[in-house]
Image (cartoon, grey):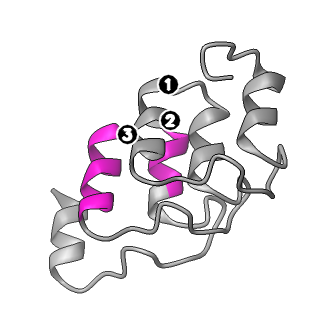
Amino acid sequence: QIIQLSLDNGADVNAQGGFYGNALQAAACNGHQAIIQLLLDSGADVNAQGGTYKNTLQAAVQNGYQAIVQLLLDSGADANAKGGLYRNALQAAAYNGYQQIV
């Protein structure tokens, strides 16, 4: 697996930059639950700020990934983190009509 190989060779699991902000946010925004778990197990900061959505929870919520939202919350994601396109995860869920996440 390319991600594991990168991490094994010293890649910074919390490196910031680009549209998504970091790898954890990119994985959350695109629904890659196994990658999210790998990154969390490797020390990714579940509350890191950056990118378009500003935090991983908002990135997952904006696409309605309920299982990923639960994983992130169980991993310590701040449900009240502010910033990003929708300002917070609750607004992202409400705006997109994800009643099961609200």
- Element carrying mark 1: helix
- Element carrying mark 2: helix
- Element carrying mark 3: loop
Q: Name the chief secondary structure element in magenta.
A: helix
- Local packing at callout 1 (Cα closer than 10 Å; few below 14, some 14-19, many 20+) is some
User: N-terminal of the two: label 3 or label 1?
Assistant: 3
Q: Which residues are magenta?
A: 25-41
User: N-terminal of the two: label 3 or label 2?
Assistant: 3
| Residue, far bottom | 10
Tag on residue 69?
A: 2
**Measured along the vertical axis of the image, is residue 85 above or below residue 67?**
below
Hey, what amino acid is under mark 3? His
Distance from label 1 to label 2 (Cα)?
A: 5 Å
Residue 88 location in percent, x, y? Answer: 78, 46
Q: Are marks 1 and 2 in contact (CB under 8 Å)?
A: yes
Report the residue at 66% width, 44% height from top: 58
Report the residue at 24% width, 61% height from top: 41
Quadrant in the picture for residue 32: top left
**Measured along the vertical axis of the image, is residue 80 above or below residue 9?**
above
Residue 20 location in percent, x, y? Answer: 61, 59
Q: Is residue 6 visible?
A: yes
**Measured along the vertical axis of the image, is residue 74 above or below residue 81?**
above
Judging by the rendered image, the residue that carries numbered circle 3 is 32
Left or right of 38: which side holds 80?
A: right
Residue 35 on the magenta span: yes
Report the residue at 55% width, 42% height from top: 29
- Local packing at callout 2 (Cα closer than 10 Å; few below 14, some 14-19, many 20+) is many
